[in-house]
Image: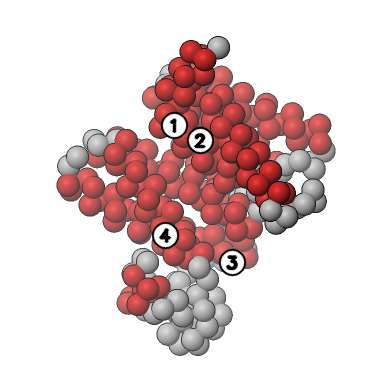
Amino acid sequence: MNPLSFAFSIAFGLIFGSFLSMLSPRLHNGEKGIVKGRSHCAECKHVLGAAELIPLFSYLFQKGRCRHCKKNISAWYPASEITVLFMSVGLSFLFPDFKEWLLAFPLVFVLAFIFIYDLRYQEIHEAVLFPGMVYALVWGCFTYGWQSTLLAMAIGGIFFGAQFLLSKGRWLGSGDIEIGLFMGALLGWPNILIGLFSSYLLGSFIGIGLLISQKANGNTSVPLGPFLVIGSMLSFVWGEKLLSLYLNAL
């Protein structure tokens, strides 16, 4: 791997991880100036200086506290930065060519956004998901061909749309339909099947584990987005191998 490309993947991961940590609460709180407004402490609203905006390192140097009001900084900030960092670096191994990596990076950012935002707020925001879905559609058409991409998107959309209609919104939210469309464009046919299957399989294991450990009950709401992200990543990286193993086992 080109050392320069690897360095860029680290830099992009930290920078956009920091952007995600700022973007998520602003979208959730409906703040104006989502992009233009300067970063500030969530507690005392003090505008942060340059030294306080260094991704991840600022949190460590300040020991997780605001320098001004001394209140704890939410752990979601470094969690967001670490998530995008690891996904960005992992993508660099999958796409050693810098141009290919750069084209695929927006998809990683959208996956990270879905993972963090749904895990934190148990909802999906269209401000990132919808443009991400459009970008994934274009990317998928060039990568898999338009037939494979549209078929996979239809499967993803219908799969979640049917559940939404049958349950009248009790099983999942309308945002999951959009995630299904995004997954289809990201994975193409037939990898969308592996993505959906692995997502629900993982979600079932985690759900059963929570019930057994009595950390959840039948009324506990568990966000689906993080499982869909993990399933998408598994299928994106090993989809063909997993499908081949399954077919050989039949």
Q: Is residue 28 above or below residue 44?
A: above
Mark 4 and 2 residues: CB-CB less than 8 Å, in contact? no
Tell me the residue at 42%/22% (across/down). 241
Mark 4 and 1 residues: CB-CB less than 8 Å, in contact? no
Distance in Å between CA atoms under marks 4 and 2: 20 Å
Residue 34 visible at all: no
| Residue 81: numbered disc | 4
Distance in Å between CA atoms under marks 1 and 2: 6 Å
Disc nearest the viewer among 1 and 3: 1
Disc nearest the viewer among 2 and 3: 2
Question: The residue tagged with tag 3: helix, strand or loop?
Answer: loop
**Which residue in the protein does label 1 denote?**
236
Q: Position of residue 151 (x, y in %)?
A: 56, 19
Question: The residue tagged with tag 4: helix, strand or loop?
Answer: helix
Distance in Å between CA atoms under marks 4 and 3: 21 Å
Residue type (three-letter) at the residue carrying disc 3:
Glu
Does residue 168 appear to the left or right of 20 in the view shown?
right
- Furthest-left residue in this view: 3
**Which residue in the protein does label 3 denote?**
31
Does residue 167 appear to the left or right of 214 in the view shown?
right
Mark 1 and 2 residues: CB-CB less than 8 Å, in contact? yes
> Is the N terminus in the top left, top right, bottom left or bottom right quadrant?
top left
Tell me the residue at 35%/59% (across/down). 15
Does residue 3 appear to the left or right of 244 in the view shown?
left
| Residue 232: numbered disc | 2
Question: The residue tagged with tag 1: helix, strand or loop?
Answer: helix
> Is the C terminus in the top left, top right, bottom left or bottom right quadrant?
top right
Q: Is residue 206 above or below residue 119?
A: above
| Residue 105: numbered disc | none
Question: The residue tagged with tag 2: helix, strand or loop?
Answer: helix
